[in-house]
Image (tube, helix red, strand yellow):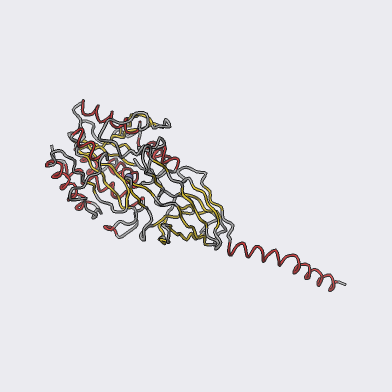
Amino acid sequence: MRTFSKALGFVLLVVVALPLMAEQGTKTAANPLVYINTVFENASPLFWEMGDQGEVNVFLMYDHERDSPNRAAGHWHFRVEAPKGSEVPIILNNLDNIYNGRKGSPAKDSSISYVSPDGKTWRAIETELLEGNRLKLLVKMEAAQMYVARLEPYRLSDLENLLDEIRDSPHVDIRKIGETVEGRPLEIIQVGNRDALHRVLIRARAHPWEPGGSWVVQGMIRRLLRDDEAARACRKRYSVCIMPMANKDGVVRGWTRFNVAGKDLNRNWDQPADAVHAPENRALESWIESMIAQGRKPDVMIDFHNDQNGRLHISRPDVDLGQHLALMKRVEALLRKHTWFTEGATGGKFRNPGSIGEGLLERYGMQAFVHELHANRIAGLDSYPSGANWELYGEQLCEVLYELFPAD
Ligand SMILES: [Zn+2]
């Protein structure tokens, strides 16, 4: 009797459980139990669906420019939820951008992505360029949740932590200069002696997908605030005035390029800012004008961006360029001397009308330029562009500025 019931139990197990297991097995192999989560700070707007081969098709949403055909999708940041130990192929779609009225794309053979089990420790992975301007990433599930982002994220909360860290320093002055479209405070962080003979204005993060500048200014601020001889010498010789995150609304929402009123904060600098749709630019413009009125015009202005070339953009608008080109030559030489920079500068008749470098040069005679940071590779380090490598660049920049400005 006992043998019989054992046998019956086994039969029942085979009849009931095996088909269930088979069904589960099929699901796991061809159609993993995947969920894509985007409900967190700086996550990118997207929708997704499973493909026939178990791949996840992610469709990024474009953000659009007002009064323009331009649109952009190139920031990706989301959390994959899938069984630990599985591999999830992800295909990014909708990378058909329109930039300066022409087709463009962030997808290249050399495009990379970052992955992280906790949203804090990131590691670069290679991507595969597929037909149809799509990028394939293979995400190995080291944990039941894996974060995926184009670059190591620098969020508004990271900036707020930095502000808390530095605000009590006697060498720091944080001043609110305006508000974003959505009412977030915009600040200028001044580090160094306010009465030093030389001042540098730095802006980061006009474009939300480009975290490089945020990492660079963090590295720079922390270096300048160290308690050592080199830092003291720098703080005495110059001060830096930093707008650390121009497009806060876009960063919080995980957008790619424009502000939430559809303006590109690196355009229209050849005319007074639109205070309604681009209050971020109006705030900076007012600050610049007040500095000029006080006889404290910044000696140099650097606007940090990310792209896939990493060069200095030396614009040549129709003004007397002698002094500007000479200074830019010195800047480039000092970058090569003191930092990992090797990418070079735009030459010939390069122009990008309305960009901040060109606009400030035309309107205020300010020595301004756009500094792109390569988003796929740092040639001078033979390494990926990580937050740590960009912070290192910010540290090294302190020395560049020290040598750029003559001793009193
Ligand atoms: Zn940019």
Query: Which of the 4 quarters of the picture holds residue 301?
Result: top left
Q: How many marks?
A: 0
Vertical placement of residue 190 versus 352, above or below: above
Residue at the far left in the pictured view: 322
Quadrant location of the C terminus in the rendered image: top left
Quadrant location of the N terminus in the rendered image: bottom right
Query: Which residue is more in the foreground, 405 or 360?
Result: 360
Residue at 63% of width from left, 65% of height from top? 25
Asked if residue 230 lies left or right of residue 131, the reply is left
**Residue 62 location, x and y as percent?**
43, 45
Query: Which residue is more in the foreground, 106 or 391?
Result: 106
Residue at the far right in the pictured view: 1
**Residue 341 location, x and y as percent?**
24, 53
Asked if residue 245 lies left or right of residue 312, the reply is right
**Residue 368 location, x and y as percent?**
22, 40
Vertical placement of residue 151 versus 283, above or below: below
Asked if residue 308 lies left or right of residue 117, the reply is left
Query: Which residue is more in the foreground, 366 or 317?
Result: 317
Vertical placement of residue 258 versus 378, above or below: above
Asked if residue 363 lies left or right of residue 117, the reply is left
**Residue 245 location, x and y as percent?**
36, 39
Quadrant in which ligand 1 is drawn? top left
